[in-house]
Image (cartoon, grey):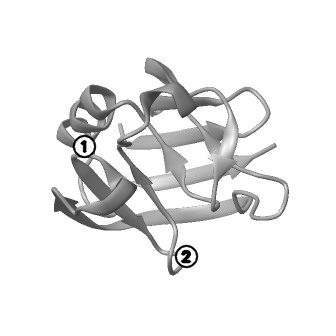
Amino acid sequence: MVRWIDVSVSQHQLKLFDGNRLIKAYPIAVGKILSPTPSGTYTIINKQHNPGGPFGVLWMGLSKPHYGIHGTNNPASIGKNVSHGCIRMFNHDVLELSSRVPIGTGVFIHT
């Protein structure tokens, strides 16, 4: 099967699937009204450990430039609409997710 990621902006949830089998669901933070998380189908194009700044312990860049799935230095933000459009995760969750998905993994973002 092929692993892929489903992101529900309205439910503040990222789900990892293997084919049609749910592997795990994670709580996330998403973009605020003025900088919403973009809907669409993208792929993970790179990974960077310890990127610095507000990105926590890991950055996974998406095929949409300037957007990614990353950790956070503000765990209280998870579950809220606070980012500049990126998908924030708890640092331990983004590390786990990254270990389970290769570069090229599909990411489907919807409301």
Residue under the image location 52 percent in, 68 percent down: 67
Where residue 75 sits, quadrant-wise, is top left
Tag 1's secondary structure? helix
> Mark 2: which amino acid?
Lys
Whether residue 75 is situated above or below residue 102 in the rendered picture: above
Residue under the image location 58 percent in, 39 percent down: 6
The residue identified by callout 1 is 98
Q: Where residue 83 sits in the image (x, y, percent)?
A: 61, 52
Residue under the image location 22 percent in, 36 percent down: 95
Q: Which residue is farthest bottom?
A: 65
Using the numbered discs, state the Cα–Cα distance from disc 2 to disc 1 in whole angstroms.
Answer: 18 Å
Q: Which callout, 2 or 1, points at the residue further toward the start of the chain?
A: 2
Where residue 101 sits, quadrant-wise, is top left
Residue under the image location 25 percent in, 43 percent down: 98
The residue identified by callout 2 is 64
Mark sitting on residue 45: none
Whether residue 101 is situated above or below residue 53 in the rendered picture: above
